[in-house]
């Protein structure tokens, strides 16, 4: 059998993880002197609270190699092949950790580590595609080949509600963050060639900004892979999330519109209220 594994930055809900039989290996969130496993013993709201109290952004780190070895060893013992996904290698050493774990247990011929070149449910889209193919009985090597065709077609972008967290993480200056707050600026951030960078600046209240952001995507959405589209958010207002969901449903195009909450890693860096629409071109 082929087992599908992902690091926790795929931001898939517990329901989707169970539905598709995916195993998650957590990254780590570091709050001062304390270290937590993403999605295991800490949730995003706790991260926001700590960040606001300390005026700084938490640090994040790759999965522990011992954890990756433990997971992979189980599949080696059962004789299964593994397709494992990681956040872009430009953003984390997760990919290297997974590769080293496979080497450590001498099972590299059966463990295929895929650099998603993406983040959040940009990874999740690939993970689900692989899980569907595995369920259909495809071999691991064939799954990897198919998935690699999708990687450059993944559209992963977000609109940020506040610049505070980007400033705390050193991704924008204090002056920019202050002016952004005064002028109600909300940048969209997109992943291109495995790297996260600014795409467009929106201005106004978040509800209107998100509406404009989704409308900007409509042409690409209507020519996307139809199976599914994700709305992934970091604690965004329910009314805003539902408005985006309704918009996507009204397109009458996608088989499934999925809503997930961003995990600790994305939340740490982008902050509360961030929302993205993610799909495969």
Image (cartoon, grey):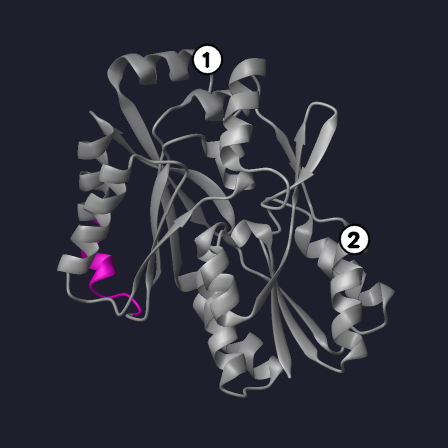
Please indicate, yes or no, whether residue 129 appears anywhere in the rendered image: yes
Element type at mark 2: helix
Q: Is residue 92 left or right of residue 237?
A: right
Q: Position of residue 98 (x, y in %)?
A: 72, 59
**Magenta span dominant secondary structure:** helix
Picture quadrant where residue 261 is located: top left
Give yes or no for residue 223 being in the magenta stretch: yes
Q: Residue at x 67, y 74 (%)?
A: 82
Magenta span: 216-225
Q: Residue at x 31, y 69 (%)?
A: 225
Residue placed under numbered mark 2 in the picture: 65
Residue placed under numbered mark 1 in the picture: 174
Quadrant occupied by the N terminus: bottom right
Please indicate, yes or no, whether residue 147 appears anywhere in the rendered image: no
Closer to the camera in the image, 227 or 100:
227
State the residue lying farthest toward the bottom.
137
Compare marks 1 and 2 and give the one earlier in the sequence.
2
Label 1, label 2: how far apart the Cα atoms are: 36 Å
Q: Residue at x 18, y 52 (%)?
A: 246
Q: Badge 1 local density, few (<14 within 10 Å), some, or many (20+)?
A: some
Element type at mark 1: helix
Give yes or no for residue 95 being in the magenta stretch: no
């Amino acid at each position: 059998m082929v087992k599908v594994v992902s690091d926790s930055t795929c931001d898939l809900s517990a329901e989707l993880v169970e539905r598709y039989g995916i195993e998650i290996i957590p990254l780590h969130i570091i709050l001062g002197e304390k270290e937590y496993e993403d999605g295991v013993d800490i949730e995003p709201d706790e991260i926001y609270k700590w960040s606001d109290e300390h005026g700084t952004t938490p640090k994040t780190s790759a999965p522990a190699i011992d954890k990756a070895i433990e997971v992979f060893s189980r599949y080696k013992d059962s004789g299964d092949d593994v397709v494992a996904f990681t956040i872009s290698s430009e953003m984390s050493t997760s990919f290297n950790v997974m590769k080293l774990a496979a080497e450590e247990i001498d099972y590299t011929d059966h463990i295929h580590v895929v650099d998603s070149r993406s983040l959040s449910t940009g990874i999740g889209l690939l993970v689900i595609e692989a899980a569907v193919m595995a369920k259909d009985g495809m071999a691991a090597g064939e799954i990897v080949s198919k998935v690699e065709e999708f990687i450059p077609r993944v559209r992963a972008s977000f609109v940020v509600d506040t610049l505070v967290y980007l400033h705390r993480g050193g991704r924008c200056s204090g002056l920019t963050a202050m002016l952004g707050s005064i002028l109600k600026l909300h940048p969209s951030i997109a992943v291109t060639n495995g790297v996260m960078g600014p795409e467009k600046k929106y201005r106004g209240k978040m509800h209107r900004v998100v509406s404009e952001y989704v409308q900007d995507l409509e042409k690409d959405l209507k020519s996307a892979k139809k199976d599914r589209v994700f709305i992934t958010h970091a604690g965004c207002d329910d009314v805003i999330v539902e408005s985006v969901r309704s918009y996507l449903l009204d397109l009458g195009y996608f088989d499934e519109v999925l809503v997930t909450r961003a995990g600790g890693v994305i939340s740490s860096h982008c902050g509360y209220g961030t929302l993205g629409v993610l799909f495969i071109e």
